[in-house]
Image (tube, helix red, strand yellow):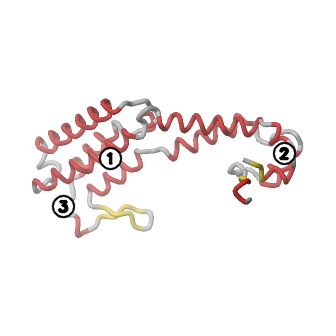
Amino acid sequence: MADDYQMIEVPAGVDPNQFVKGMGGGSSMVPPSSITQKEKADLLEKIDPTKVVEEIRHKFLGEALINGKWVKVQALQGRALSEKGAWDLSNLMLSVSSQNVSISKLNDREIRDRTLNIVKTAQYMCNQNWEEYGLKGTDQFHFIHQIIISNTFITLKQPEGEGIRKMIIGTLTESRVQQSSPQNQRGGLLNLFRRR
């Protein structure tokens, strides 16, 4: 029986008591358009592949996040890239690690071709600039290759077939339908639980 009910969440930043009063009084306390924009912004903020690239850049530099600050780990400095190497390679990944790319529509062939081109460019950059990048062994080339191909491929797989775009549109549509439904406009406290 408990599975027949679904909890309705109060939007972030809204007083729960005011929200319930607004639902029971026949009008929504927060206009649907402002909730929708906030939800859209929240979703887009969560879909931010640039954060991973920034973390990879710090890892290339031999740094670890300790108490909210990136700190050089002495044991890793012998294998760390130079600032130039870390920045160049992370900037290369940023070309596909953005919110714009995440909400685009890509097919499998485009994803594979783009990933291959980025990895080839990274290899060329490492071969051409190995000394400037602080590379000390061929194993580092393979290590960098695997990091860049994994991050790029997975990042580009997210928008395959408009997956993320459809998820965002579906979430926003569901939100609008729930907010404009007559069932959500009456019922007071009893409306906090509704039949599926």
In the image, residue 103 lies at what x, y percent? 47, 34
**How far separated are the C-alphas under marks 1 and 3?**
20 Å
Mark 3, residue position = 79
Please name the amino acid that badge 2 sits on: Gly
Residue 82 rendering spot, x and y as whole percentages? 21, 53
Residue 164 falls left or right of residue 155: right
Q: Quadrant of the N terminus?
A: bottom right
Q: Look at mark 2 in the image and give the residue it sits on.
A: 22
Side (left or right) of 66 relative to 194: left
- Nearest to the observer: residue 32 or residue 84: 32
Q: Residues within 10 Å of mark 2 (few under 14, many from 20)?
A: some
Q: Dot 2 lies on which element? A: helix
Q: Secondary structure at mark 1?
A: helix
Marks 2 and 3, the one that precedes in the sequence: 2
> In this picture, is 196 found above or below 103?
below
The three-letter code of the residue at mark 3 reads Arg
Q: CA gap, disc 2 to disc 3?
A: 59 Å
